[in-house]
Amino acid sequence: MDTTFAETLRPFLRFAGDRPIEEDSDLRQLGLDSMQAIELLFAIEDEFGTTLADDLMTDATFQTAGSLWAALRTSQGEPVNATADPR
């Protein structure tokens, strides 16, 4: 996960505070609800210039920061386990 991705998530996670957002961070526990998930999806697509595939629009995708990051990487055609260049 890169820092731009984590910072894109932060405004949608009302309980995150100053804690670091890590791959295993549970997005629901940090305050993401279904309406915010839609807004977050648009923010991610705008920030990273890609569209997440319809088959990735599942509860599991939005479970953790890491699962959402993996969906983004998949949509970009990049290997999920590859280390991203930090922005």
Image (cartoon, helix red, strand yellow):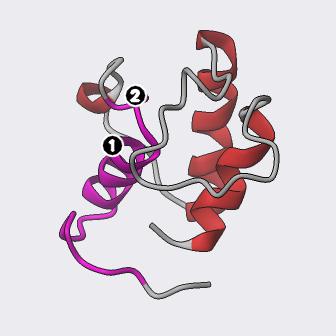
**Percent coordinates x, y for residue 66 in the rendering:** 37, 49
Q: Quadrant of residue 14?
A: top right
- Left or right: residue 73 versus residue 14 is left
Magenta span covers which residues? 61-84
Secondary structure type for disc 2:
loop
- Left or right: residue 34 versus residue 74 is right
Q: Which residue is mark 1?
A: 67
* Count of numbered labels shown in the rendering: 2
Q: Residues within 10 Å of mark 2 (few under 14, many from 20)?
A: some
**Percent coordinates x, y for residue 63 in the rendering:** 40, 28
In the image, what residue occupies the spot 24% across and 65% down? 77
Does 55 sit above or below residue 3? above
Q: Which residue is mark 2?
A: 63
Secondary structure type for disc 1:
helix
- Left or right: residue 77 versus residue 28 is left
Q: Residues within 10 Å of mark 1 (few under 14, many from 20)?
A: many
